[in-house]
Image (tube, grey):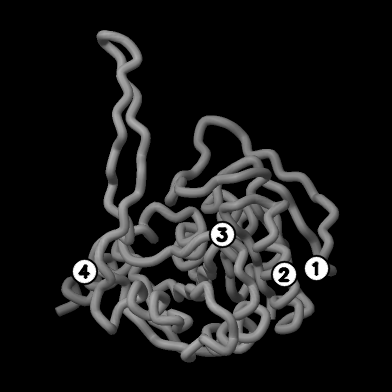
Amino acid sequence: MRILITNDDGIDAAGIRKLAEIATKISDEVYIVAPSGQRSAVSHSITVGRALRVRRVPFPVAVRAAYSCSGMPADCVKVAVQALLDKKPDVVISGINNGHNMGYDSVYSGTVAAAREAVYQGIKGIAVSTWKEHYVLVDRYLETVLRDAINRRMLTHEVWNINFPACGPEECRGIRETLPAPFPRYKDVYKMTCVSENEWEYALEDEECEIAGEHTDFYAVAHDYISVGALECSVLRDIKKSDVDGRK
């Protein structure tokens, strides 16, 4: 099995090293193509109008090859699948993100977008996130969770989204399959500063929303469960639905 790893925190991030350590326990064909630097919250942006610069780089984990890419997370998947690798990967795993990607917030995530791009390329996509490099539960459970996700039969328009709570193994209550909460985790609150008569600065300050119902990712992580669940790639879902409707 061939695994492609990427992220949105950059090739030098601690999370991608941790993910590579665990992925190499699952397969001896692990490749990395990741952004050259921080690309958080870029969603599904791609690079147009200029060439991508891809460079093979040394990596602290023994993978087949690691590459730094000047583009966005979605670019990394696209260039890896379409040009860089000699064979299509079986699965793309994106992460481990330094922060949760749940509810509506996953729409903004470059981590989730890379997994979504994999699905657009006809490959299983998995996104993994935890809270601020909290890897205690990751070390214990991620290999098992990934093996299950890789072997699981999923709809062709779904991304598998995994979020770890910030607790120790003793407090972890298990793994819970969830749905994304129907709102963001934080409200957008802007603090305004007047720069001049015709210019202002607006600094975004997060304010927590309520915790959603027991079936949601927010609730699971807040109550010390590992949250796993499917996110829909609505474009593919709608295309496939229109194909079916057109055949009726």
User: How much space separates mark 3 and mark 4, taking CA atoms?
Assistant: 37 Å
Residue under the point 71% across and 61% down: 32
For the residues labelled 1 and 2, the Cα–Cα distance comes to 7 Å
Q: Secondary structure at mark 2?
A: helix
Residue 169, position in %: x, y?
59, 86
Answer with left or right where residue 85 lies relative to residue 144.
Answer: right
Q: Earlier in the sequence, mark 2 or mark 4?
A: 2
Q: Residues within 10 Å of mark 3 (few under 14, many from 20)?
A: many
Secondary element at tag 1 = loop
Residue under label 3: 98
Residues under labels 2 and 4: Cα distance? 38 Å
Q: Residues at badges 1 and 2 in contact (C-beta under 8 Å)?
A: yes
Whether residue 154 is visible here, answered yes or no, is yes
Which residue is at the far top?
197
Residue name at image x 81 percent, y 50 percent = 57
Residue named by callout 1: 63
Q: Which residue is mark 4?
A: 242
Q: Nearer the viewer, residue 175 or 128?
A: 175
